Amino acid sequence: MEWFTAPDYWLARLVFQRALAVVYLVAFLTAALQFRALLGERGLTPVPRFVERVPFRRAPSLFQWRYSDRLFAGCAWAGCAVSAALVAGVDSLLPLWAAMLLWLVPWALYLSIVNVGQTWYSFGWESLLLETGFVAVFLGNEEVAPPVVVLFLLRWLLFRVEFGAGLIKMRGDECWRKLTCLDHHHETQPMPGPLSWFFHHLPGPLHRVEVAANHVTQLLVPFLLFAPHPVSTAAAALMIATQLWLVLSGNFSWLNWITIVLALSVVRFPADPPSVAAAPLWYEVVVLAVAAVLVFLSHRPVRNMISRRQVMNRSFDSLHLVNTYGAFGSVSRVRYEVVIEGTADEVARKDGDWREYEFKGKPGDPRRWPRQFAPYHLRLDWLMWFAALSPSYAGPWFGTFVERLLENDRATLRLLRGSPFPPDAPPRFVRARLFRYRYTTWRELRETGACWERTYVREYLPPTRLTAPR
């Protein structure tokens, strides 16, 4: 079938595949370095406890059959190795069928992790990586030109990501309709970046331009993805530029980067296509069958998008094949942070020697400037942002987290910037207090050197100690 392939997009496929492999690598590295404290046998929400109550059909995963920290580490590091091989282009050296199987490996491994990841893996970019990764399996390698229907599926996915995010904003917080959300968002976003302070202090009219440009990019431009080249390429380029603006303004894990990767698949790069053989019949049959299934499953996210009760970041099947996306339908006006402190004093006095635990990414010491971590995902830091919004978000894990701090648990402390206590002398008490944070003004920054100003609000957790003697 001559119409089956699009030779002019061979370079777009190559760039897309290598960039997607990099995102996979970051995702697996994040899992390998953080899982033990979060999901391990002594983690805050252990996988063994989860799989005891959730059946395989609801959360298909390798770890449903067997779990150990060693097996999880092996899967995560194996995912890193396969992803690195794909970055290096090993798939281009293999037969078509073998290359497809190689691309299937990181998808299956990451699916196994996400489906037991519980609250730590409840973010939209997890499903987005899985959906993108599954479609990528069928893009082929240098033996054949990129299939038209697979390129269409990638555009359809990018359309749902952008258009769904635009709709959730227009239906959500009124500040999106009034163009005022960015008066607050740069300050109250989950994990600010090193430039977020400066973005917050941009003039008000420029914030209005930011929001208006976002609406155009998410509500109008996505329809141009299905136009012929060069219109579709220009639409993708505009989306990439918007995502890079978001990369500069905050830390949103790999959400922006995976969106950029999807947009790269739309760009028709000016390069002559190499000579390749016609696609084999078995490949055409497999691709068309998979495409038909994915198009059929798309009716659920479409119904969600047109619904007045649209929800964000929902998976409609346990394999995360077709999902709905969206972010920040509502924007906080005030930033709260949970500050955790410990003391070695025999008696927990309010004015005792309380030492603060510093996190790697979330705001703590007002003088410490935020760092850039994305696309790496600091999962505990993100969940601490939700915990500050409401203690109910932290219910399943916060108590265990405090217990691990009282034990000076090494795996847990690795998630933090550091511990204020020696390894052999853990704190006797740990407490948590809620503070309101705001960005300092230009004048306050010059006078104090602090980018944040914080005000005590209330006690979040009273001084707590281990009941059993250490």
Image: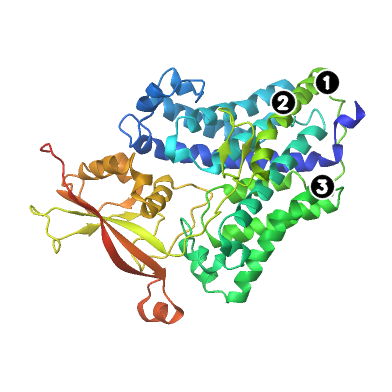
Residue 27 relative to residue 413: left or right: right
Number of numbered tags placed on the structure image: 3
x 43%, y 45%: residue: 379
Q: Residues within 10 Å of mark 1 (few under 14, many from 20)?
A: few
Q: Secondary structure at mark 1?
A: loop
Provide residue 119's location: percent of width, then percent of height: 43, 39
Query: Label 3 sits on what residue type?
Result: Arg
Mark 1–mark 3 distance (CA, rounded to whole Å)? 24 Å
| Residue 222 against residue 17 in the figure, above or below | below
Q: Quadrant of residue 154?
A: top right
Residue depicted at 72% across the width and 47% down the height: 264
- Taking 92 as reference, is 204 left or right? left
Q: Which residue is mark 2?
A: 293
* Inter-mark Cα distance, 2 to 1: 21 Å
Residue 150 at x, y percent in the picture? 76, 33
Residue projecting furthest to the front:
308
Question: Is 236 placed above or below 141 here?
Answer: below
Q: Which residue is mark 1?
A: 280
Q: Secondary structure at mark 3?
A: loop
Frontmost residue, 8 versus 41 = 41
**Within-10-Å neighbours for mark 2: few <14, some 14–19, many 20+:** few
Task: Report the mark closest to the observer, 2 or 1.
Answer: 2
The quadrant the N terminus occupies is top right
